Each structure stands twice: as structure tokens, then as C-alpha cells.
Amino acid sequence: MRGLAGAGVYFRTMAVFAVVWWLLSMWKSNTALLPSPVAVVGAIWELAVDLELFKHAAISLARMIGSLALAIALAVPLGILMGLSRIADDLVDPLVEILRPISGIAWIPLALFMFGIGNALPVFIMTYAAFFPIVLGTISGVRGVDRRLVDAARTMGVPSRTIVTTVIMPAAAPALLVAIRLGVASAWTAVVAAELIGAPSGLGYAIEWYRELLMTPQVMAFIAMIGVLGFLFDASLRWLSRRLTPWAPQAVSR
Amino acid sequence: MSAAAPGRMLRSVAVPLLLIAIWYAWTTAHPTVRTPTPPKVVNAAIEMIASGDLPYGVLQSLGRVFGGFAVAALIGVPLGLAMGTVRAVERNVDPLVESFRPIAAIAILPLAILWLGTGTSAAVMIVAYAAFFPIVVNTVAGVKRVDATLLRAAATMGIDRLTVMRTVIVPGALPSIGVGLRIALGVAWTAIIAAELAVGAKAGGGGSGGVGQMMFVFYAYSIELNRIVVCMIAVGVVAFLLDRVLRVVLRRLMPWTH
């Protein structure tokens, strides 16, 4: 009921937007500068039939998933350790706070020297970008775990390792999933910049390629693809967190 | 903080110092012409600050950030207030916001270059776009969090909408708006570096300036890794200071939130 009405309003708004855009493009009448929505839809269709749209999207997605896995593998154990141990936190936190303000994108020129142009560069930049939100979210998730649960488990003689897997991890899971969503958003922003400058393939590369050819409808098609994939990624993570942690409040900050 | 302070201080500098020591040892063991080493980076930093290049580049980037940020705030806050208070506005505008929010600011950079060229206005547009979404989203959330009892009290007393907006809604939503502004400023600083880098990369170092552009020139033309590292440190320091300064300003403006 709400979904249908919502979809109606959504399409109405987007239709108004498309009409305004179409009128503007008629007035400008310069396809390279401002193509009409029809031309963009045509470009999307052609690129989709060509499979070119999906080819670049698949490359960017594969890099995204690889970097996300890498960032989770590095950041979650570190975050748990920092959340549990005062000493680990004292040791590592300064480094995190020194590096965090240096955005992943600022690493691109140096990383170009380290890795050259190819897959390694975007993966490095995205892993770096996703790392900090995940590590910080994990720490605060672990710290937010009810002390009494941990104490109760300890009283019953549960070994520390089991406490981590059966008490702390489940209790910290909702915060962890929010952190992963933030990490994904930050990595997805970085992928475009990294591919725009230092990769021979992927969505960012395709956008730049068609910009140089002044084929603006194609540029817009790929921009739309970035938006759609970013939205789908976030939606599937939200769905996953509803399935995995149904007890968590869903109106989380975004 | 007091009793354990020396031990904690020591621990907090241990890892960064250790890493710098490893970096130094490794680069002295395997010396190459271009590999950045700690002393070379310090020298490069001194040169770049003394010559005024680095401060000038940072100021150029900061100017663009503040320009774009101001545009985003001037559009985002009123729009967010309207969306938060008038249901019809929210229903009709939200689809647009939600459709464009997943599109990263850097992705529209090629369009910005196409429309506005490779100068400051394209960079400002990217910053404004990047900063707009956190501001709108947090303003709407802030308005929704305003205590309904206060609104009803104001309505009972027959206060007109504009006065309610000024005296109840805006003060109530301010903490959340502040959070949005802080997030937006951080995002804006990231976006300007990306925009300047990409403009440099794609426009062939077209002399539009800024820290990002400097980094690209050091990468592509003069190949000075030490200077790239200096720029990266500068980017980090500025990001850190921007956040701190805005935090202090917000605390001064609304002491009741802390």
C-alpha cells in the first residue's frame, strides 16, 4: 500500500525532472553539452546491448567486493582487539587518527608510483577508504556491548575466545553492519576517482573515456550506472542487516 | 589521564615512531634516487613552506571548499527545513535527493568540466554537490527530531508558522544540522582534492592550482615523491584542523548540546 503510493510519487517527481531536463536540452540544443533524456536512454540501451555497460560495471564491482573483503579482514579483527584491549587501543589509535584525515583519494599519486596503473591501485585506494569507518565502527560496537553479558560469561568460566565469538560478536553485529555500510559508501566514492585517474577499465575509466570523445549521453549513462550500483549495494547491505540482526533498530543514521 | 599519563603517552607515540624508524632504516638500506625518506620529506616540507607554494595551494583549495560549502549550506539547510516541516515538499523532493545521493561527486566531475571548464567553478560545483547531501539529510532528520510537544504548545498559543520555524524548529534542529555541516565539510575537503587531482590529470595540469593539482604535477611532470608526501600530510593536517575548528564553532554556537 505504502510502497505503491510511494512508487507513484517517485515516478511523478522523476517525470517532472525529466521534462524539465528535456526542455532545457531543447533550449540548449547541443548534445555534447546537454543531451536530452531521450538521447541518454538511447545511450544506455546501446551500451547495455553491447554489454559494455555491464562489462565495466562488473570490473568495478569485482574491485569493490575484493577491497571490501580485504578491508573487513583487516579492520574487524583490529577493531575487536582495540575495543577489548586498552593497550592495543593506546598503541594503534594514534596511527589511525594520523592516517584517517588523509583521504584515500590523496593517496592516488603516491599509489600510482607504488602500484602503477591497473587493478592494484583502485583496490588499494578502496580498501584504505573502507578501512577507517569499519575499524571505528567495530571499536564503538565492541565498547557498546553490555558489560554484564561479558561478566556473566566470564563468571561461568567461558574462555575469552568463546566470549568474543558468542557474546561480543553478536552484540556488536548491528554496529558492525552500519560500519560496513559507511565503509562501502566511502569506498564507492573512491573507486570513481581511482579509476578516473589510474585504471585502464571500470566505470570511472569509462566516464572519462567518453568525456574525451565528447559523447555526453554515454558519460551520463555511466554516471547513472554508478548511482544505481551504489544504491543497490546499500540496499542489499540494509536488507542483509535486517536479516542478520532483526533485533537492531533499523532507523539508523545514514 | 593523571597517574598513567607517562605510560600512555609513551604508548601513543610508540607505533608511529616505530613506523618512521622502519621507513628510515629501510630507505637507508635500499637507497634510490626517488624513494621518499624522512629527512628528504622534512626538507621538502621546509622548502615548500618557505617558498610559499604549499600555503598558497592550501589556501586555494580551502577557498574552493568554503565557496562550495557555502552554496551547499545555503541551498541545503532551507530545503531541508522545508522538507522536514511540509510533508508535501518532502514527498515530492525526496525521490530526487535519494536518486542523486548514491552518485559520487567525482562521477559528475566530467560533466562539471564540460559545463564549467577546468577552473575554479567546476571545482566549486563538485564541492557543493558533495556537501549538499549530508546537509539536507541531517537537516530533515533534525527537524523530525524536534519535540512534538513543543510544536503543539506553540500551535496552541496560536503562533504563526514563521515564528514557530524561527523559535522552535530551527533551534531544535540545530544540533543535527551541525552534525550535517561537519560531515559535509569533511566530504567537501575530500572532494576538492579529488577534483583538483582529476582536473590536473585530465586537463594536462591546466594551472588551476590547489593542493590536489600540486600533487598531480609532482606525480606527472617533476616526479618528486617527497613533495607528494608533504602534500598528503598537508591534506591530513587541514582535514583534522577543519573538523576541530568547526567543532569548536558549533559548541560555541549551541552550548546546550554538550
Image (tube, rainbow, N blue to C red):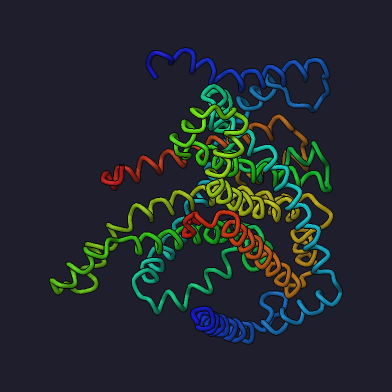
Residue B25: percent from left, percent from top: 75, 15
Is residue B218 toward the left or the right of residue A17 in the image?
A: right
Is residue B242 toward the left or the right of residue A167 in the image?
A: left
Residue B117 seen in this snapshot:
no
Residue B89: percent from left, percent from top: 41, 77
Is residue A102 toward the left or the right of residue B5 in the image?
A: right
Where is the C terminus of chain B found, in terms of image quarters?
top left
Q: Quadrant of residue B227?
A: top right
Residue A249 seen in this snapshot:
yes
Q: Residue at x 26, y 67 (%)?
A: B165
Along the line of sight, the residue nearer the viewer: B124 or B172: B172
Vertical position of residue A15 compared to residue A141: above or below: below
Q: Residue furthest left?
A: B157
Where is the N terminus of chain B found, in terms of image quarters?
top left
Q: Residue furthest right?
A: A50
Numbered circles on residues, count: 0
Q: Residue at x 82, y 19 (%)?
A: B31
Vertical position of residue A233 compared to residue A13: above or below: above
Vertical position of residue A253 compared to residue A4: above or below: above
Q: Quadrant of residue A189?
A: bottom right
Residue A29: percent from left, percent from top: 67, 84
Residue A106: percent from left, percent from top: 65, 42
Along the line of sight, the residue nearer the viewer: B155 or B183: B155
Along the line of sight, the residue nearer the viewer: A90 or B180: A90
Q: Residue at x 34, y 71 (%)?
A: B85
Q: Residue at x 40, y 44 (%)?
A: B246
